[in-house]
Image (cartoon, rainbow, N blue to C red):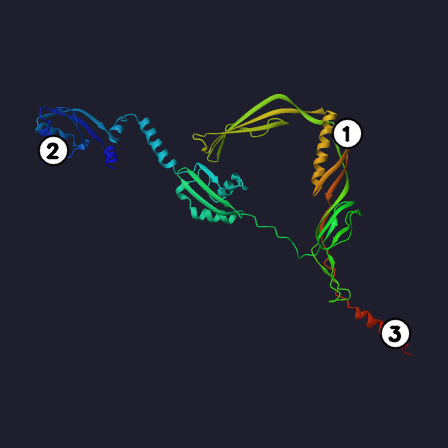
Amino acid sequence: MKKFMGWLTGTLTARITGAEPENFLNICARTGFPLGRMAWVEPFVLEVQVPARWRGDLRAVAEQAQCRVEGEVFRGLPFFLQRFRGRYALLAGLVLTLAFCLVGSRFILTVDVTGNETITDREIISQLRLCGVSQGTWGPGVNIREVENRMMLAMNELTYFSLNLFGTRAEVIVREAQPGPTLRDEKTPADVVAGAEGIITHIEPWNGDARFQVGDTVGKGDVLISGEMRMDLHPMVWEGDAGTRLVHAEGKVLARTWRTLTASLDLNAPGKTYTGEVSHRYALSVWGRRMNFYQNSGIPYDRCDIITRLESWTPLEGRMLPILWEKTTYQAYTLTTASMDPARAEAMLKEELMENLEGIMKEGEVLTAEYETERQGDVLTVTLLAQCSEEIGRTVKMDTDQKVRPPKSPLEDMVREEEKNTKEQSP
């Protein structure tokens, strides 16, 4: 602090030369004249440092000790500013530079996001902009606690949000919410129905009664595992029909299926040929404020490709300033007809059909695959005939109007039979 104050007010460094420089030191000690720094340079030369405003007092003490003051060097801010006397442009530039360093360092120039995995930086920064914090925001005017609360209310995907300001850098630390486990629906009555036609190769009911066996042929929509489950009780507990109850049927049903998929492609596809006409437009964006260096904002050609290239100034690695130079290129073209190679088109259609087949199957594998190719004019058609082994069970909610059948005792049939016989014997 003492050194900084000396630089702020100015210092004087000089050499005290004489036959007995010790007398100078004795006088300084007797009169209480402070010396900021003192060092012997030669046997009769003493170098001292004092505040610049004490130049006259230093000369008076040196004369009293019969010594000379030589090699005066003035340092500090006042003497630095004296160099700009009459150079007002340089002085104005110095003032503006200092103001920019002092004031500009309080604006937010970069926003760094850490801790996110599924949510992108752009999503977080976009929402943060809506909460009042972005590149170019005045840092001291940001209410950090309020911004944190607003971000937590706006983004349900986050369980933690922290905003820290370090000069021109805003640090955002987030923690994403972990998705809860998916609970199985075991209460809603449901059936397992066939999602495709086929021959059952394996059926494994986990809950519910199986309606088919291995080797049976089923159609699309048939109930494979019923949610209407028959109650089985021991004969010593109940001798009659125990009734049914509704359950959420589950199970695994594998079947051999046959799939047919078709895709077509026009071999004369539209294409484009570039004419060679190219035009460029430039724009500069500073803290989100865009400045266009062109007048006409319309598209210059009827048909053209638009290529936009953004360049930013990154003085330090990983620290991008909010200054973007935008270059937009327009390349004109005309529409033409391009002929596609039939072999290449056929291979592309086969690959697309196989991807569609794998997407249709819930779980399984393709056993055999055969392709049929047909060309009518410029249209190429490929048909895929595949034999698959796949999971065809699909869970379907049961009709809510379906009722549970209550238990039926064998005594009820006996009572009804006696009542019937009594009515027949009565006159």
Of tags 2 and 3, the one toward the viewer is 3
Q: Which residue is mark 3?
A: 421
Q: Nearest the camera: 306 or 355?
A: 355
Q: Quadrant of the C terminus?
A: bottom right
**How far from the left and from the top, in percent, is residue 33?**
13, 34
298 over 112 or under it: above or below:
above
Q: Which residue is mark 2?
A: 28
194 over 307 or under it: above or below:
below
401 over 50 or under it: above or below:
below
Q: Quadrant of the N terminus?
A: top left
Residue type at the position of mark 1 = Val
Residue type at the position of mark 2 = Cys
**Callout 1 environment at 10 Å: few (<14), some (14 to 19), or many (20+)?**
few
**How far from the left and from the top, in percent, is residue 57?**
13, 31
**How far from the left and from the top, in percent, is residue 396?**
71, 52
Q: Quadrant of residue 305?
A: top right
Residue type at the position of mark 3 = Asn
Look at the numbered disc 1 and give the secondary structure of its residue.
Answer: strand
Residue 182 relative to residue 356: left or right: left
Whether pointer 1 and pointer 3 mark residues with C-beta atoms closer than 8 Å, the reply is no
Q: Earlier in the sequence, mark 2 or mark 3?
A: 2
- In the picture, the disc for residue 379 is 1
Q: Earlier in the sequence, mark 1 or mark 3?
A: 1
37 over 183 or under it: above or below:
above
Q: Nearest the camera: 42 or 7?
A: 42
Q: Residue furthest bottom?
A: 427
Residue located at (46% from left, 38% from top): 111
**How far from the left and from the top, in percent, is residue 367?**
75, 37
Look at the numbered disc 3 and give the secondary structure of its residue.
Answer: helix
Q: Nearest the camera: 133 or 284?
A: 133
Tally of numbered discs: 3
